[in-house]
Amino acid sequence: MFKQALSKNYEGKLVEIKNLFNLNEKNIDASQLLMKFNSDLETYNSSQNTEFDREIMYFDAQTFIPSGKFVFFAWGEKINSKEFPYIDNYARTIYQRVVQMGKNAVFVYKKEKTKNWCEEHLQFAAPLQMGKYKHAISHSTKKAFEQIPPVCIAYE
């Protein structure tokens, strides 16, 4: 899907894709797995051992420096600060670093929620999300990359 979205205007350009968690799982946004990540991130900044290898699974959110001109956020809409406070803090730190560095923060969001609400609550649609909005999210992601630099687009 990203290959199709980037093929027209970004041909020949280097694009780096990073995952919030470096785990290749089919259902990475399942609540049970997110609970594991949340408890792991609770011990991440301490001297305690984490369940997942900290060098492989996570990158230091405090010193994260994106190398491009824009960052496309697409970690989904299941992370909320009440249920997963440590994931929310980790993701919020990454998002704030990108904004502080003056990078263009781009994402696809649900039209009813508004762009500002999504930025405040870190709710960025995942293009590979299953369900009734899959096609709408994929279409909006492609539309976001029709411009250089890409822009935030709502899906319906």
Image (spheres, rainbow, N blue to C red):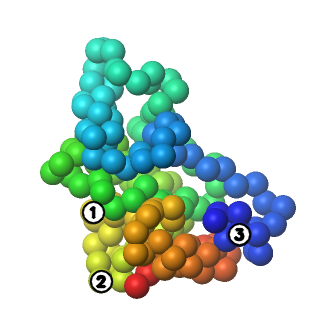
Reading the image, the residue beneath label 1 is 121
Q: Which mark is residue 4?
A: 3
Nearer to me, 12 or 93: 12
Q: Which mark is residue 112?
A: 2
Q: Characterize the local packing of mark 3: few (<14), some (14-19) or many (20 or more) Cα atoms within 10 angstroms.
A: few
Depth-wise, is mark 1 or mark 2 nearer the camera? 2
Q: Residue at x 36, y 77 (%)?
A: 110
Q: Earlier in the sequence, mark 1 or mark 3?
A: 3
Q: Earlier in the sequence, mark 2 or mark 3?
A: 3
Q: Residue at x 48, y 46 (%)?
A: 26
**Which percent across, then down, holds residue 19?**
52, 45
Amino acid type, label 3: Gln
Q: Is residue 23 left or right of residue 29?
A: right
Depth-wise, is mark 2 or mark 3 nearer the camera? 3
Amino acid type, label 1: His
**Which quadrant of the figure contains the N terminus?**
bottom right
Nearer to me, 94 or 108: 108
Q: Residue 64: tell me if it is visible.
A: no
Depth-wise, is mark 1 or mark 3 nearer the camera? 3
Amino acid type, label 2: Glu
**Which percent across, then down, holds residue 50?**
34, 21
Distance of mark 1 from mark 3, alpha carbons? 28 Å
Rendered image quadrant of residue 117: bottom left
**Which percent across, then down, holds residue 105?**
49, 64
SS label for mark 2: helix
Q: Residue at x 40, y 69 (%)?
A: 131
Distance of mark 1 from mark 2, alpha carbons? 14 Å
**Which percent across, then down, holds residue 93?**
36, 47
